[in-house]
Amino acid sequence: MSIAQKEARESNYWLRLLKDSMQAKEEVVLDILKESEELSKMLYAIVKTSKQK
């Protein structure tokens, strides 16, 4: 799960770069970025909970 969390953060980074470079429609990238950030938060919660147990 830790690896998945790191990969999700990296995906968020590349999506933000894509949005800022204007290589794709901003509204499409923002939708994907929002979902990616939600996934990243879920993975963070899973990793945090796993470490506590």
Image (tube, rainbow, N blue to C red):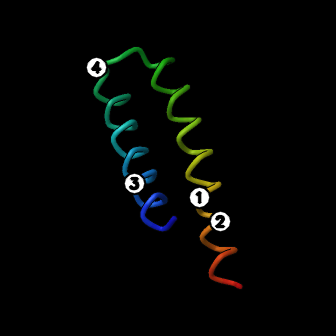
**Discs 1/4, front:** 1
Circles 3 and 2: CB distance less than 8 Å?
no
Numbered badge on residue 7: 3
Whole-number angstrom distance, CA of label 4 to CA of label 3: 22 Å
Whole-number angstrom distance, CA of label 4 to CA of label 2: 33 Å
Dot 4 or dot 2: first in sequence order is 4
Dot 4 or dot 3: first in sequence order is 3
Give the side of residue 53 with respect to residue 19, left or right: right
Q: Residue furthest bottom?
A: 53
Whole-number angstrom distance, CA of label 3 to CA of label 2: 15 Å
The residue that label 2 is drawn on is 46
Q: Residue at x 45, y 25 (%)?
A: 29
Give the side of residue 48 with respect to residue 15, left or right: right
Circles 4 and 2: CB distance less than 8 Å?
no
Q: Amino acid at mark 1?
A: Leu
Numbered badge on residue 43: 1
Q: Amino acid at mark 2?
A: Ile
Say what secondary structure mark 2 lies in: helix
Give the side of residue 15 with respect to residue 33, left or right: left
Residue neighbourhood size for the residue with mark 2, other residues' Cα within 10 Å, grouped as few (<14), some (14–19), many (≥20): some
Q: Amino acid at mark 3?
A: Glu
Dot 1 or dot 4: first in sequence order is 4
Numbered badge on residue 23: 4
